[in-house]
């Protein structure tokens, strides 16, 4: 092993304005933005679908089941290509014109983030559903017999309890969304993984570039676990296993 | 015509290219399954072993691979593996480096996920079984081989198969190293014929049919084993 490590390569200018380190950080920032925005979509849509799967109405539950089955059985890369190439053509004219007026990187970012959110929503839906179904039926019945309407029972009783139960699986979904965002590079989003290729091509320093990018992913992972760990400690249900 | 899509451009040769791609996808998935099961089980046993060095090494391996994206692993191995192979194999050996690095990268990556499933499986076997095996005079490796592992695999069979479906979908990511699997062939045909939208619908549909059928089979199996 006589490899010459040259970490100073990151301080060299990549172009007139940026160094290679700036590229790396820009990639990390894009990944973080994508993950957070995608998570927002996934959480809202996924919660809605999760509730839909548990309501006592076959049609509504069936729609949510169909959504989950379709999304879960098509690879994310195919979905992102569909969001990038096909969906804009089906949008209303005004929205499409706005999208196409953006810079190519921005329109790729928007479609990929939505695609990522919609994909993760199916997984969030399953977690929310599992959380609600793990509650004893007595809880739902008690809420209804107290005079809550069904939406109120979900809003004040079922959802608050199940969210607090499903924090650990939600943490791993959140970790996956940051990892999955790497696939957005295939439709032209310049996030961390795309930057890894770019750094490798421009600097010809494969090992350094890869170690740097992997470290960024590890840092993002650690941040997510730290934040979710804090939330879990704060929101832990008293009287359950694992609580104080 | 649906959504202004037009599928007339699909020819016999395009179909054959996609079929060949599907075989590559299945080959990658099959190899990763076989290696992943064996290597993953070894990792799980190491993780649960009382020897600290073993369990830490295994934990480090599993957590490392679970923290980085698959695309990153595939590209990394694509850059490193050809160099390694050149050193290991005699000069002039012809090998498909894309396929080899995809197989190696995939297998090592999926092993980390299989290790976690097998760990849960081994831990799901009751303590009494271990004690009974010991009382019968079985050595630890005999107990593992003929008492614990068979039960662990049986308990985890639905999860192992579900992971196989996920794994099959993940093979589409070899796109990043341009290995001509099903997805990459379909995308290539789409680019060539200027019909990328149609080809993505076709690809999505094929994956949907295959994976949906497979997951239905798995849930039937789950009902039968319970």
Image: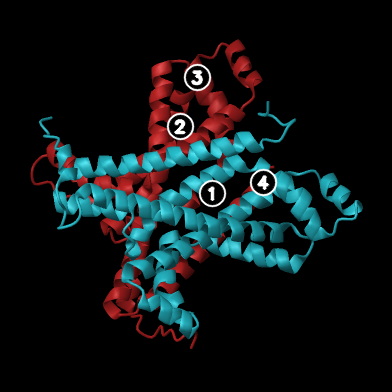
Chain colours: A cyan, B red
Label 4 to label 2, Cα distance in Å? 33 Å
Instruction: Please provide percent x and percent y for residue B59.
Output: 43, 28
Q: Do labels 4 and 2 touch, CB within 8 Å?
A: no
**Secondary structure beneath label 2:** helix
Residue B41 image label: 2
Label 1 to label 2, Cα distance in Å? 17 Å
- Do discs 3 and 4 belong to a common subunit? no
Residue occupied by mark 1: B162
Residue at figure coordinates x 21%, y 51% from the top left: A199
Which of these two is toward me, A203 or B178?
A: A203
Q: Is residue B176 above or below residue B148?
A: below
Q: Do labels 3 and 4 touch, CB within 8 Å?
A: no
Which of these two is toward me, A210 or A81?
A: A210
Residue B142 image label: 3
Residue at figure coordinates x 13%, y 30% from the top left: A1
- N-terminal label among 1 and 2: 2
Label 1 to label 3, Cα distance in Å? 29 Å
The label nearer to you, 4 versus 1, is 4
The label nearer to you, 1 versus 3, is 1
Which chain does tag 1 point to?
Answer: B
Q: In this view, does A63 lie above or below B96?
A: below
Label 3 to label 4, Cα distance in Å? 44 Å
Residue at figure coordinates x 41%, y 23% from the top left: B56
Q: In this view, does B171 lie to the left or right of B122?
A: left
- Where residue A138 sits, quadrant-wise, is top right
**Secondary structure beneath label 1:** helix
Which chain does tag 3 point to?
Answer: B
Which chain does tag 4 point to?
Answer: A
Which chain does tag 2 point to?
Answer: B
Residue occupied by mark 4: A163
């Amino acid at each position: 092993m006589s490899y010459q490590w040259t970490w100073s390569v990151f301080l060299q200018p990549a172009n007139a304005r940026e160094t290679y380190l700036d590229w790396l950080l820009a990639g990390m920032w894009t990944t973080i933005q994508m993950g957070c925005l995608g998570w927002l979509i996934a959480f809202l849509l996924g919660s809605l679908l999760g509730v839909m799967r548990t309501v006592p109405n076959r049609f509504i539950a069936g729609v949510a089941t169909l959504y989950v089955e379709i999304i879960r059985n098509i690879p994310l890369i195919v979905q992102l290509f569909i969001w990038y190439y096909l969906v804009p053509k089906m949008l209303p004219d005004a929205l499409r014109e706005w999208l196409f007026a953006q810079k190519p990187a921005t329109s790729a970012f928007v479609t990929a983030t939505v695609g990522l959110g919609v994909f993760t929503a199916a997984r969030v839906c399953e977690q929310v559903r599992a959380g609600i179904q793990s509650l004893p039926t007595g809880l739902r019945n008690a809420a209804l017999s107290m005079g809550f309407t069904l939406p109120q029972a979900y809003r004040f009783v079922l959802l608050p309890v199940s969210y607090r139960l499903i924090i650990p699986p939600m943490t791993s979904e959140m970790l996956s969304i940051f990892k999955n965002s790497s696939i957005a590079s295939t439709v032209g989003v310049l996030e961390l993984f795309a930057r890894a290729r770019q750094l490798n091509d421009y600097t010809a320093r494969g090992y350094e570039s890869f170690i740097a990018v992997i470290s960024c992913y590890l840092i993002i992972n650690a941040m997510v676990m730290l934040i979710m760990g804090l939330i879990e400690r704060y929101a832990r249900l008293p009287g359950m296993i694992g609580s104080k | 015509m649906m959504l202004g899509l037009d599928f007339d451009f699909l020819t016999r040769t395009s179909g054959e290219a996609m079929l060949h791609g599907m075989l590559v996808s299945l080959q990658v998935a099959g190899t990763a399954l076989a290696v992943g099961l064996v290597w993953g089980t070894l990792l799980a046993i190491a993780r649960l072993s009382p020897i600290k060095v073993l369990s830490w090494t295994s934990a480090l391996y599993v957590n490392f691979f679970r923290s980085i994206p698959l695309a990153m692993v595939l590209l990394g191995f694509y850059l490193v593996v050809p160099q390694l192979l050149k050193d290991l194999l005699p000069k002039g050996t012809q090998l498909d480096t894309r396929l080899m690095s995809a197989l190696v990268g995939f297998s090592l990556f999926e092993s980390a996920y299989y290790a976690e499933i097998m760990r849960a499986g081994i831990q799901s076997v009751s303590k009494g079984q271990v004690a009974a095996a010991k009382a019968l005079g079985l050595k630890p490796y005999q107990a593992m081989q003929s008492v614990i592992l068979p039960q662990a695999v049986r308990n985890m069979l639905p999860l192992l198969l579900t992971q196989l479906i996920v794994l099959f979908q993940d093979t589409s990511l070899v796109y990043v190293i341009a290995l001509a699997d099903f997805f990459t062939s379909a995308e290539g045909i789409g680019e060539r014929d200027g019909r990328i939208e149609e080809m993505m619908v076709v690809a999505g549909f094929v994956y949907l049919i295959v994976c949906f059928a497979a997951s239905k089979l798995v849930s039937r199996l789950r009902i039968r084993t319970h």
